[in-house]
Amino acid sequence: MRQAIGIDRVVKRYGAFEALKGVSLSIADNEFFTLLGPSGCGKTTLLRTIAGFEDVTAGAIALYGENIAALPPEKRPVNTVFQQYALFPHMTVRDNVAFGLRMQGVALTERRARAAEMLELVHLSDFAERLPTQLSGGQQQRVALARALAPRPRVLLLDEPLSALDLKLRQAMRVELKQLQETTGITFVFVTHDQEEALAMSDRIAVMSNGEVQQVGDPRTIYEAPVNRFVADFIGETNVLPVMVDAVADGRARITLPGGHVLTTDALEGLAPGAHHVSIRPERLSLATADADLTVRVERVIYLGTDLQLLARLADGTPIVTRLQNSSRNELPPAGADVGLTVEAGAARLLLD
Amino acid sequence: MAAAPDTSGSVATGWRSLAVPLMLPTWLVIGLFLLVPVALMGVYSVLTKDFRGGVVWEFSLAAYDQFFVTRGLFGDEPPQIEWTYIAIFWRSIWQAALATLLCLLIGFPTAWFIATRSPRHRALWVFLITVPYWVNLLIRTVSLRFLLRDQGPLNEGLMAIGVIDAPLRIINTDVAVQLGLFYSYLPFMVLPIYAAVERYNFALSEAARDLYAGPWTTLREIVLPVVKPGIVAGCILVFVPSLGAFLAPDLLGGAKTYMIGSLIDEQFRGSMGNWPFGAAVAMILLTLVLLVLLWQARAAGRERR
């Protein structure tokens, strides 16, 4: 796997504030890579250091093996799609799209042809002569995309490009962006705080918090095997339960759930017996038919259409959320009833705190 | 209005019916103190001058004739174009254009600097820019004269530290007039440009840099076109008053730096004046300025298209 971007122990400091605390990442060629995290986690800062808008305090950034950390943005073969699009208001859509090519010294006829090609790619051929202010938000977004793709960058950086769109458009654009990345074969580095967006589009995700990378992995790993409490909490809905690790052997751990039931699950590297936490996704819990892993008292059942949400508590008061598929077979317990829940095999994931 | 939908009672119509009474004071002020004097000036310019100053109410084109046509010293030669006043106009336009350029070159970086400070510091800088303008223009121009004269602080200071041996001849030259105009009208350049740069979205500059434009290309291709309305406004606000200025040329310039403002001013002073001629020069200046503004408005309109 060829490396497109190598980020090596990058530190970014603003005065006393450390926005990036020694981040290292390797992004592969042709990959749709997402930087995911809450606002202020450093994801946008990291993207801006790759683009060249921010210099790094320490560390190196390599683009296809070449260290670019000292280069100004105009010398880096990467292009950016900005959050608020940043289209040039005094230029037509065509001139916006052709701007990068003009700056690279591409001849007029080829510039025209490439701009037309890009506008076709984003379905805006009929809007070439318009000014950006005469377009809707979704159309402006496509122009920004076409403008950044026109110079055929080796890497495309996208800074929350969908956040200004309404929900329907956002969902449609997800599919389109993913298709675009596959057809162009350009490496995409995508910044978002929306975990659903990240899961839907990415080949791999880096979850960030407090200027550090918490976990890197494909969407399935990030969702199903979060390494720590932050990742488990941030990605989707989860139940975090206190457990006792009784024994660790051969990468497996024997744990005791609250209530005394014993399970075996994957151990984490360097795990010692003692008090720990596990994460269990709500959809990995079901109503027990025989031997229950957890016993809870039901507080409320919420009807969500495709799903039913069961809100309950353990004897010690820990809240437990269960998602059950809506089917006619369900016999739902009334509020106040004590019910047994089964934890799907492998669903209880040990967390590093 | 018969076909208009019935919106009586809505807030909008309520205000619309109040529009005329609310606008009346403005119209009165503009009419009384702007249009009437200009009309009066137009009328005076086609009257006959009274030798004691003032006018005789008798139609005459003598003032315009004096401006454009010469018939020799004794008025008995065939009519030719009079270049004296046209030359004064030309010099005034030239001086005003130069002052505008100077204000732009200094004003743009100044405005840029202020607009890129933190919001709290911006207010302070704008305040500092306007502080000198709380003092009357005449007093400021006189003090500039004091500052620049041969035995003034500037020359004495430069000689004391040994930069020059003899005083620089600044006072009564075009340089002094330029300094005076520049100093008088700089804020009129800085403030509109500041307002435009403050609204400028700096992500546009980042986008340009990202698309392979260097810093200077970004300035030329993106920044200047986007803040152009502010620059144009600043240039008009400096050029127009510079063209008619009379304090700076009068107090700082010499005989060779005579400008339109002084020419007009002189025609209304004491019994030596010539009111119809002064009015005619003012009317010609007004026409010129209106033509420039009209041309600018049409150019801006074409761009917006």
Image: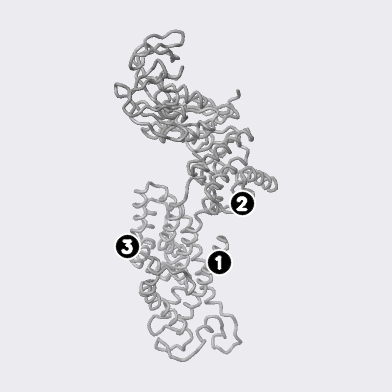
**Marked residue chain, label 3:** B
Q: Nearer the viewer, residue A131 or B120?
A: A131
Q: Quadrant of residue A240?
A: top left
Dot 1 alpha-carbon crowd within 10 angstroms: few under 14, some 14 to 19, many 20 or more = few
Q: Residue furthest right?
A: A109
Residue at 45% x, 84% y is: B44
Nearer mark to the viewer, of 3 and 2: 2
What residue is disc 2 on? A127
Q: Which mark is residue A157?
A: none
Closest to the observer, B245 or B212: B212
Q: Which amino acid type corresponds to the residue marked 2 in the rendered image?
A: Phe
Chain-order first, disc 1 or disc 3: 3
- Residue that badge 3 annotates: B134
Extreme residue in the left direction: A316
Q: Circle 1 sits on which residue? A: B298
Q: Are marks 2 and 1 on the same chain?
A: no
Kindly identify the amino acid type of the residue bearing the numbered disc 3: Trp
**Location of residue A285 in the rendering, given as x and y in whole percent from the top left corner:** 42, 23
Taking depth in this image into account, of A333 and B172 the one nearest to the observer is A333
The relative height of residue A351 versus residue B261 in the rendered view (above or below) is above
* Residue A75 visible at all: no
Q: Which of label 2 and label 1 is nearer to you?
A: 2
Q: CA distance from mark 1 to mark 3?
A: 35 Å
Q: Position of residue B150 (x, y in %)?
A: 39, 62
